[in-house]
Image (cartoon, rainbow, N blue to C red):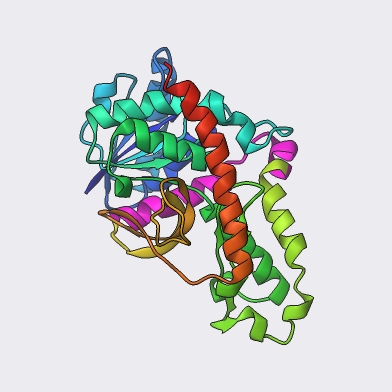
Amino acid sequence: MAKVTIIGATGQVGSYVAHAVSQFPHVQEMCLFGRVGNEKYLDGLAHDMMDSFAARGTNTRVSFGTNEKELRGSDIIVLTSGVPRKADQTRLDLALENAKIVKQYAEMVGRMAPDSILIVITNPVDIMTSVALKYSGMMPHRVFGLGTHLDSMRLKACLAEFFNVHVSEVHTRIIGEHGDSMVPMWSATTIGGIQIDNLLGAAKVPREEMIERVKNSGTYIIQSKGSTVYGPGDAIATLIKTIVEDENRMLTVSTQIRWDIVGQEGICISVPTRVTRGGVFPIAVWMADDEVKAFSNSVEVIKDVLKKVYSILDKK
């Protein structure tokens, strides 16, 4: 049984994740965590959720708080706090402002729940995952970010639509930055178990158009309705289910890479990763030459921003 804590539960994504995750049988307790001054809202949210759980017959305890001691005993902590991205901003524009917030919470988690698994959602997620890992002092396999997991699902949906097949027949991955330098792994994309380039209709797949659609999906949703909630919310819930049920799934999330991952190491970026109850473990895979080049470029994008962020955070 697991205790799942949502830092930033008063936000739309945080509250949706709390509600979605509570339906999993292995989640025994849901802790809604927020800033000092938000106690009344958190209390109301907890009561609202308890009513929902009673209506659907869910036996999950709900607690809430703003004191870091509430983090104790957490098996999984989801960090969603941060300034939301505006439609005219890139994820990297947010880096410094959100890094200060993530550093504060990461230090709390490191003090109160160092044996938990910390999932970072705050954007730009690759930068924030590296920041959370450094300032929490936790082991690398216990800290990871949402990364390109949702981007991979978005590409999966595009391909299912194009080939007119059930989405479960499509297997594909986007690696690298959750942002403009993301890298689609066409070499690892299959439809019904058949490598995409072996399909007669492969030449007609509008690959560049699909990737642009994936890149701009979040911006489009923000412009249309103000925020992205359900897509990231269910992507996060899937990760939590994978952990609490120890499914040993291979997912594409932002984790600290080793030298055997295309000769790069030290930063957090999305790669194929085994996700388990014990943590996350990146997997070295073969890539086409153009994918290796694009991934290396994506690494450099993250490194450049991270260097600037650390130079400011380390002065404080």
101 left or right, relative to 94 = left
Task: Tell whether 305 sits left or right of 285.
Answer: right
Q: Is residue 143 left or right of residue 230?
A: left
The quadrant of the image that shows the C terminus is top left
Residue 179 is situated, as x and y percent measured from the top left of the image, at 62, 46
Regarding residue 63, the answer to whether it shows in the image is no
Question: Is 232 included in the stretch rendered in magenta?
Answer: yes
Q: Look at 49% across and 51% down and name the residue there.
A: 235
Which image quadrant for residue 78?
top left
The kind of secondary structure the magenta stretch mainly shows is helix
- Residue in the foreground of this view, choosing between 179 and 113: 179
Q: Is residue 182 above or below residue 38?
A: below
Q: Locate residue 17: give its quadrant.
A: top left
Image location of residue 49, percent across then percent down: 40, 35
- Image location of residue 130, percent across then percent down: 43, 39
Residue depicted at x 69% and y 33%? 89
| Residue 307 seen in this snapshot | yes
**157 vs 26, nearest the viewer:** 157
- Quadrant location of residue 133? top left
Q: Residue at x 29, y 34 (%)?
A: 137
Residue nearer the viewer, 279 or 59: 279
Does the magenta portion include 72? no
For this rendering, which residue is in front, 50 or 68? Answer: 68
Q: Which residues are magenta?
A: 220-244
Residue 167 sits above or below residue 73 on the image: below
In x, y percent, where is residue 243? 32, 54
